[in-house]
Amino acid sequence: MLAAVLLSLCLAPAASRVGAPPSAPQVTRAVRAATAAHSSLRLPTHHLPSESSQFATHHSLSRPLLALPLTQRRVLRTATAEAISSLPSEPAAGVPSAETGPVAVKGVVDVKAFKTPKEILVALAGSAKARAKMSMRDLVISGFLAGSYVAIGGCIMTMIGSGLTGFTALGLAGLAKLLAAAVFPIGLIMIVLTGSDLWTGNCVIMASGALQGTCTWREVFRNWVISFGANFLGALAVAYFLMFESGMVSLDPARSWVINAAEAKMGLTFKETFLRAIGANWIVNIAVMLVTTATTVPGKILAAWFPIMTFAAIGWEHSVANMFSIPLANMLQASSFTNFLELFAGFLKTNLLPVTLGNLVGGIAMVALAYDRIVMKPKRYDEPMRA
């Protein structure tokens, strides 16, 4: 205990000088220098760890100090503090300096809570560069998983929402909608933490890459087309195998809830569907930016949770979510496979087409282009066009 107190007292002057306590090797050098300068100190320095040893810790330094009498510890405290003060200044572990910039130290966690807007867009462009180089096979697998995860979010939303139908009779329809929407974000959370390719989220990612020159627009469209198709396959697989064939929605209230929700979506006009889709992917791509700015897993989860819950509770239209919910309703309604194909064709024309167009506008115009304009290139758009 006394040795620990001695160390803390020796380290205090240096801590104020460099912004953090000196390292164990620094203290080792200082103790050796203090012992050499004071012949009255009989410290067994051969027991001290090597200055360059990776095992030099404050605990290993404290053991030899226990051999000293109290009066000699006081002398050593003063002498060591003076010796530390004469050492060359070193930046604290993990703390950047003007000369060296950020210092990467093993075992030290970067405590920066979030990225700046410019850092977000640069990170998105870097992600776009990597996604543009993915093989078609890998992109299909990644997109299939992303579509499946969104559908799984739809699964839990269906089961929770259908169980809250009694709230409407009590005048609590808004609360029921909020509770159902609160569980839907699990899909995007799984996507962003696993790095899967959701085409709606890739709107801001890939467009940012093209705008910053890390990928071409041809690579952008390739990514969007493949991920869109793979998302569709993943959503349909979950709808058919995990919900329809498994019997999860074969009985009320789940069956009625799925069909009523799909009929409400199919009853919208082209303009209404298109505008609601803009809002949905605007929020989804903001969620992607917020997830990118977070540097911890809890931060990324919260960054994804609230925006996605917002658009789901409002009732805006998301193409990949609809790839799950409306075909599932078609499966429940169809009397035959031919009848299913007719219902499915109606879904593609009446809902998925305007939703896809609206999602493109929401993700590209409202997020990617807007933030590229105000963050990355605030002057470029003001320059006169050349003939």
Image (cartoon, rainbow, N blue to C red):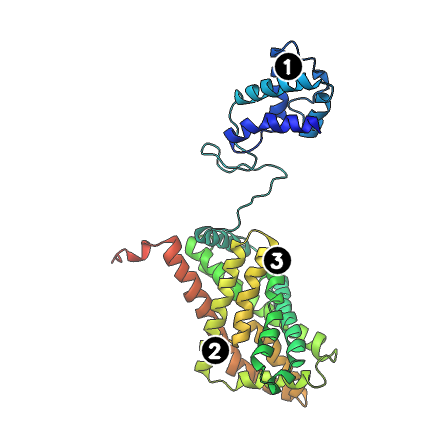
Q: Earlier in the sequence, mark 3 or mark 2?
A: 3
User: Which residue is drawn at the image coordinates 60% and 67% (left, top)?
Assistant: 185
Kindly identify the amino acid type of the residue bearing the numbered disc 1.
Thr
Q: Nearer the viewer, residue 137 or 56?
A: 56
Kindly identify the amino acid type of the residue bearing the numbered disc 3.
Leu
Which residue is denoted by mark 1 in the rendering?
35
Q: In front of the other: label 2 or label 1? A: 1
Whether residue 198 appears in this view of the structure is no
User: Badge 3: few (under 14), some or many (20 or more) residues near its Cα, within 10 Å?
Assistant: few
Q: Earlier in the sequence, mark 1 or mark 3?
A: 1
Whether residue 27 appears in this view of the structure is yes
On the picture, is 344 further left or further right than 242? left
- The relative height of residue 300 versus residue 8 in the rendered view (above or below) is below
Which residue is denoted by mark 2 in the rendering?
354
- The relative height of residue 152 versus residue 130 in the rendered view (above or below) is below
Between the residue at mark 3 and the residue at mark 2, the CA separation in whole angstroms equals 29 Å
Q: Earlier in the sequence, mark 2 or mark 1?
A: 1
Between the residue at mark 1 and the residue at mark 3, the CA separation in whole angstroms equals 53 Å
Quadrant location of residue 320? bottom right
Give the image location of residue 171, x and y in percent.
58, 85
Q: Secondary structure at mark 3?
A: helix
On the picture, is 284 further left or further right than 46? left
Between the residue at mark 2 and the residue at mark 1, the CA separation in whole angstroms equals 80 Å
Instruction: List the single residue furthest toward the top.
Output: 39
Which residue is denoted by mark 3 in the rendering?
193
The label number, if any, that marks residue 243 in the structure image:
none
Give the image location of residue 363, x and y in percent.
46, 66
Give the image location of residue 381, x and y in percent.
31, 57
Q: Secondary structure at mark 2?
A: helix
Kindly identify the amino acid type of the residue bearing the numbered disc 2.
Pro
Image quarter (top left, top right, bottom left or bottom right) of the C terminus: bottom left
